[in-house]
Image (cartoon, rainbow, N blue to C red):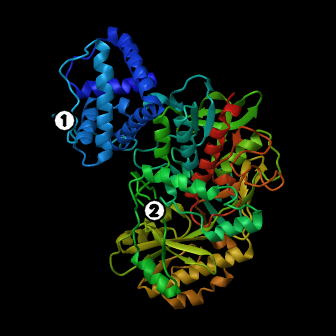
Amino acid sequence: MTEKDIAKIRKFSRFTFPFDFPRKDDEIDTTEKQLQIIINILKRGGENLRKFIISSLYALDIISFFSEGGDFLSLDETRTKRLLIKLTTSSRKTPQNIFRVLRFISTISFWDSFGNEKIGFKIPQRRDDIPKISWEIPEEEPKIKIEGYRGVKWDIERIKFGKFVRRDIRIVSDVIVVGSGISAGIISERLTREDISVSILEKGYFIDAEIPSVFLSQSSELLGMFPVSSIANINAFFGKGIGGLGNLSFSIFEKMPDDAKEIWRKFHGVSTKEIFLDFATKEAEEVINSKGNGNANSRSETIEKISEFFRTEPKSFNKIKGEKVNLLTGEEVFSPEKLIKYAVHFGANLYLGFEVEKISRGKKWFVEGKIKDEFGNIKANFIAESKAVFLCGGPYGNTKILWNSGFKEKTLGRKVKIHPAGLITAIFKSPQEQKDSSNYIELSKEGIFIKEIKLTPGVWSSIFPGMFGPDLVKTAKKYPFSRTFIFWFREAGDSYFVKTPFGVILRTNLKGEDIAKFLFAIREISLALLSCGAREVYHPIRSVPPFTSPDDINNSNIEKVKPNQLEILSIFQTGGCPIGFSSDTGLCDSTGRVFGEKSLFIPDSSSLPDSVLVPPMLTSASVGMLSANSFIERKNFILK
């Protein structure tokens, strides 16, 4: 029984029984008396009674956390009263029994600690002995919506904004987590619950209370944040800010399909069962579902009509609702930012504007980088000292950091999948209700996924400024009549990162069959939309006008289109630091630990050895859960 447990009992007694609370001068002495009384009770009751009392206190914290958004000791007066009202008026047996046990133990320990052996209070033996407590709780004043989420608020004292820094900084922590994506959130929250000191380094900021910070880098930007070299025009999305690229993944948390597992086993020798990834997926799913706002599945009637055209049955992704507004779809999605927020609530320190450049190891790990403001201006330098490092910066970020740090493993920067994607917008004759649907079509023979997203032609024109120019901007006026669809697939070629004098560049290796598959998807989806009543179909092919009829498609000679005429998206990338069974086949093992290092982990999408076919949010979270569990099992060895 700890002092924290005593404090819970004292707080419970304070709100349950009408007596004068002791003065602060008497609190230490009172606590010692209570502890002695409870020790005597435990000696008489044995181990079973001790476990029963501790379990009741633990259950009180769980009920408090889910009903009021914090543990029992952290609640203010109003929320504490509200919680006790729920316990005493509940129709369930569990809250009633918790109240009985805590009332009994607080009576004999707290009241007797003042020497009041008999004060006229007796413990009734009836089953309906729980008093119906009622307080007049004032109504909460309406508050202005601010950054963060309902339930747990940001602990601003644990957040360091780099834009306000004026001198170099040194950070000391048990664990450093680089990045703030889904895997970083899973790991940070898991470790802070184990009372491990965690510092999260994120190069971005809170851009807006509602809109996540997602940026686009085009292939023409040689010196951009994520430059791409390719025979086609590859437009790569990446995240910068709290939540990372997870803010753009349509809030889809889909398990890895069997086809992807077979690809991992066949081409890389990695079995998801042998590395316990399936078990970790269940754990990660439970954590994410507990933080989300329920299922957000929605049905697109057009997808169902297109499925009839392809003679296939539509499927549905597992989509979770949250409070963050998706930048492209405008819908409320679950953002990894919420996991970071809980990690900060449990004791992690968050550093914003801290861009990591390299890491080095002596007796401890040293993480070095620059502190920048929102505009990229350097404010100062920083160095972080820790006993373990988790790199969660994505394929590009992790590869860049490791190369700058002198890592020369032959698999570093390899086995990258960009998942070529394209957008197609159809203009109908009547107003259309756009939605980011959860149902989708899978053309299993070709391996192409198709789903509807809520994206207007006007937004599309900003993504592809040189595509149709003024014509597409004019078409944006037809927004109420449009529906937008995205398709993607796993490419046959492996892309890779290269180190140049201009920085790290992603070199895509799209093969002829990948270009043919991209053109096939444009052709078939356009035909399907025209058969569904669309009067115009805008496609990602330069110098080819919008399709208005099947004849336009047949006369356009799509098969002869050159790769540099295609506008290809890369919404999510995997690989760069792949999992393998040795340093010859991968950079890290099944838990994300780098070969040859006991305390360097790479547990995000960059460690996936191949495509997951579906958006990799849940799989990245699963690898993060594997790494966190492995670290906790070995923490005494790592942190000694």
Under mark 2, the amino acid is Lys
Q: Is residue 248 above or below residue 558?
A: above
The outermost residue toward the front is 44
Q: Quadrant of residue 521?
A: bottom right
Specify the label residue 133 is tagged with. 1
Q: Quadrant of residue 453?
A: bottom left
Q: Is residue 61 above or below residue 476?
A: above
> Image point 30% across, 29% down: which residue?
104
Q: Position of residue 459 (x, y in %)?
A: 46, 62
- Nearer-the-camera pick, 65 or 316: 65
Q: Quadrant of residue 617?
A: bottom right
- Nearer-the-camera pick, 79 or 420: 79
* Contact between labelled residues 2 and 1, with CB atoms less than 8 Å apart: no
> Image point 28% across, 19% down: which residue?
111
The outermost residue toward the top is 25
Under mark 1, the amino acid is Ile
Specify the label residue 319 is tagged with. 2
Q: Position of residue 130 (x, y in %)?
A: 21, 38
> Image point 80% across, 40% down: which residue?
406
